[in-house]
């Protein structure tokens, strides 16, 4: 009987050890959430922003982008074309922050860039409100007089394009131009 008891104890210890490993592994995965990291299989996020300001139709050369850093794990790039910055584009690349993926952070930022009224003293913050289909993962555009603002998101990158339109140009024509610029600019964002 002692041999049977020893065999039973051995199985109990091995079973207990396996159970402990499974419990610790599950707790660790729940705490660290590796599926939110860009290296997780099936997650497609950008690792870098474009290194150049591309040539946009009908605009002068864009030049070298200005690199920016933001709060947390945000990296940015600004480009401008034309005199008095007729067209400006700002890329923002979001990385995982705590329990939110880079894509989740970018979704939150893109959603916050809508036109809002902050009262009679502060007035409006200008954003983009009308959805644009077929541009990135999500996009919106709005015209505020001669200023056209487009906000688009591709995975963990948010692109904001501002264009001051000439006085003779109609709203539809101005919005079509900004949408074309955004297609070119988002085309430079490479997902891993």
Image (cartoon, rainbow, N blue to C red):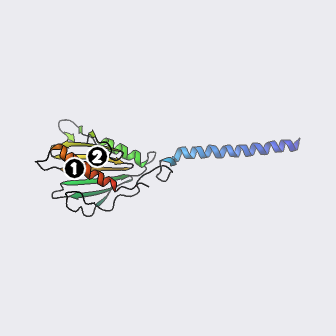
Can you give x and y, in whole percent of width and height, for residue 54 in the image?
28, 60
Q: How many angstroms separate mark 1 from mark 2 (CA)?
A: 14 Å
- Quarter of the figure with residue 22: top right
- SS assignment at label 2: strand
Marking on residue 108: none
Can you give x and y, in whole percent of width and height, for residue 93 in the image?
36, 53
Label 1 belongs to which residue?
177
Compared across the picture, whether 166 is left or right of 51 comes to left
Can you give x and y, in whole percent of width and height, for residue 94 in the image?
38, 51
Q: Total of numbered circles in the picture? A: 2
In which quadrant is the C terminus drawn?
bottom left
Label 2 belongs to which residue?
151
Can you give x and y, in whole percent of width and height, for residue 84 in the image?
15, 57
Q: Is residue 102 visible?
A: yes
| Residue at left offset 85%, top offset 42% | 4
| Residue at left offset 42%, top offset 52% | 45
Crowding near the residue tagged with mark 2, few <14, some 14–19, many ≥20 C-alpha atoms within 10 Å: many
Crowding near the residue tagged with mark 1, few <14, some 14–19, many ≥20 C-alpha atoms within 10 Å: some
Going by the picture, which residue comes out furthest to the right?
A: 1
Going by the picture, which residue comes out furthest to the left?
A: 168
In which quadrant is the N terminus drawn?
top right
| Residue at left offset 37%, top offset 47% | 106
Identify the mark nearer the N-term, 1 or 2: 2
Q: Is residue 70 visible?
A: no
Of the pair 175 and 159, the residue shown nearer to us: 175
- SS assignment at label 1: helix
Asked whether the residues under the numbered discs 1 and 2 touch, taking CB atoms below 8 Å apart as contact, a structural biologist would say no
**Image depth: mark 1 or mark 2 in front:** 1
Compared across the picture, whether 98 is left or right of 10 comes to left
Compared across the picture, whether 86 is left or right of 158 comes to left
């Amino acid at each position: 009987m002692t041999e049977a008891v020893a065999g039973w104890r051995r199985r109990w210890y091995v079973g207990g050890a396996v159970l402990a490993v499974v419990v610790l592994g599950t707790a660790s995965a729940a705490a660290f959430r590796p599926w939110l990291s860009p290296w997780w299989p099936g997650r497609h996020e950008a690792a870098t922003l474009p290194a150049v300001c591309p040539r946009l139709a009908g605009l002068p050369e864009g030049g070298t982008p200005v690199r920016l850093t933001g709060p947390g794990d945000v990296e940015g790039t600004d480009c401008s074309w034309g005199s008095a910055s007729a067209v400006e584009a700002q890329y923002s690349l979001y990385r995982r922050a705590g329990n939110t993926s880079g894509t989740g952070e970018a979704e939150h930022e893109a959603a916050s860039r809508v036109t809002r009224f902050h009262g009679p003293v502060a007035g409006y913050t200008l954003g983009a409100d009308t959805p644009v289909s077929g541009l990135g993962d999500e996009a919106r555009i709005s015209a505020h007089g001669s200023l056209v603002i487009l906000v688009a998101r591709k995975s963990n990158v948010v692109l904001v394009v501002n264009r001051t339109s000439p006085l003779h140009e109609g709203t539809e024509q101005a919005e079509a131009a900004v949408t074309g610029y955004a297609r070119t600019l988002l085309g430079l964002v490479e997902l891993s």
